[in-house]
Image: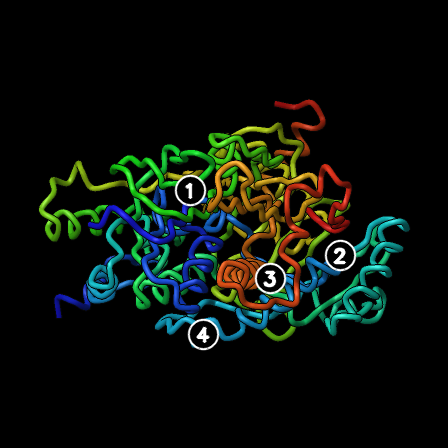
Amino acid sequence: MKKAYDTIIVGGGIVGCSIAFELAKRGVKDILLIERGYLASGATGRCGAGIRQQWGSKLNATLAVESTHIFENLESYTGYNYSCGLNQAGYLLIACTPKEWDQFQINLDVQHELGVESHVVDLEKDVYNYVPFINTDGIYGATFCQKDGHADPFHCTFAYAQGAKRMGVEILTYTTVESLIAEQGKIKGVHTSKGDFEASRVINCANGWAPGLAAQVGDEIPVFPERHQALVTEPVAPMGPNGPMPMVMSFHRRFYVQQSPHGSFIMGIAEDEPISFNYRSSWQFLEECCSIITNTLPALRGLRVVRQWAGLYDMSPDHCPIIDFSKNAEGLLNICGFSGHGFMIAPRVAILVANALCQQEDAIDIHMFSADRYRTGDILIEPSVV
Amino acid sequence: MADQILICRCEDITREKLMEVIAEGYETIDEIKRVTRAGMGPCQGRTCRQLIAQELSKIYGVPMEEVLMPTFRPPVKPISMGALADAYQAHAEGGE
């Protein structure tokens, strides 16, 4: 294979693959994407697979809404032969304290400004029309958005990757980028487990591992890996009013659970985790997760857990992504810090990045995502994360 | 006929389907699992993992022991959420 490219993308998750696709679509030739395992083997393939537009910050809501529009047609957008598994069964967000309920009112205003069809759900009369068997004890209020839902992270990533390949992007899997090569303030390429590759532009989409690569050229990216665990049950008949049970999510009780179109239930909880690259699963999670979720949804007690796993969130200080043009190695772009919601906003982020690199206009200013914001104080605040 | 042989009984994946995705470039058990769901059902790949490995061994001409195995994930067999939730309560109350 060739040894020199125009652009090298490090990381074959949805972020790397969607950027490869959007760049190729804009006519960029000579792109090599390098992935340590198989495509979507990192955070993308380990995520909760949710698609949510009920965000608290205008920025995340905008990225999510515009990404959802792409997910709605991702198969034709990328020319993919399989289904990407999008199922818009909705998200029911529950508030468990008065303070949280107040925050939801503010969030609704932000969402409505962007045209998100989220609304308050009456807990006495109406909530059972969305989630028939919910235990409402201790719940203060709830909001619902029908257009929220689920997509298959593997198929979405494979869709972008295959689309990119058809436009000439080369993809090298089971290959580790061990270090970046920079000389005299410019990026020159990457050193990998399968030899060196040259490029004058390198896009670092290595999620939790991105800051470590960036640090090699002196870029300080304040993003830290944090383990998050999830589990999946056996498939059962649809348990929602018109199909799979919608996502039920609580920030206060720190859980999410939804039924996939396939019938299985995917769920996770946020635990108190140290900064660590540990992504092994634990039995403590299995028990605590089932306890927390069956308190709100006792009807799930009879479901059997078939598999559990863990992955890494790449946590940034304000829970918003960092898109940072290197000041130490010209031509290097560091993209990470998605903080657990990278999958659902990746389609729009990829467009933003590709537009910036191809000098095309974009309604969103990419520079607001620079890591400089932590120095200048222009941070992007997101109140609604699990 | 041979192509209608079931490889993954939990998810109804046939040998024909397996050959189709291998031809599309999915080269490892991990990738095949994620594109077809083979190995994601109640038995978690106890049967199909070996069968897929045999096919990959033949196609790529590598010995069986060199075929890359996916991660074996807990639990070993399906457990109800109720049993796990009760175990959490028992631990919280100081039991073993």
Q: Nearer the viewer, mark 4 or mark 1?
A: 4
Q: Are marks 4 and 3 on the same chain?
A: yes
Q: Is residue A205 left or right of residue A179?
A: right
The numbered dot on residue A57 is 2
Residue at which label 1 appears: B77
**Distance of label 1 from label 3 (alpha carbons):** 30 Å
Q: Amino acid at mark 1?
A: Lys
In the displayed structure, does residue A125 sit left or right of residue A160? right
* Dot 2 amino acid type: Ser
At horizontal 52% and vertical 44% (from top left) the residue drawn is A334
Q: Which residue is mark 3?
A: A51
At a point 55% along the width and 60% down the height, the residue shown is: A356
Tell me the distance, in whole angstroms, between the alpha carbons under discs 4 and 3. 18 Å
How far apart marks 2 and 1 lie (CA) works out to: 42 Å
Mark-to-mark CA distance, 4 and 2:
27 Å
Type of amino acid at the residue the image marks with label 4? Tyr
Using the image, determine if residue A89 lies above or below residue A331: below
Q: Chain of mark 3?
A: A
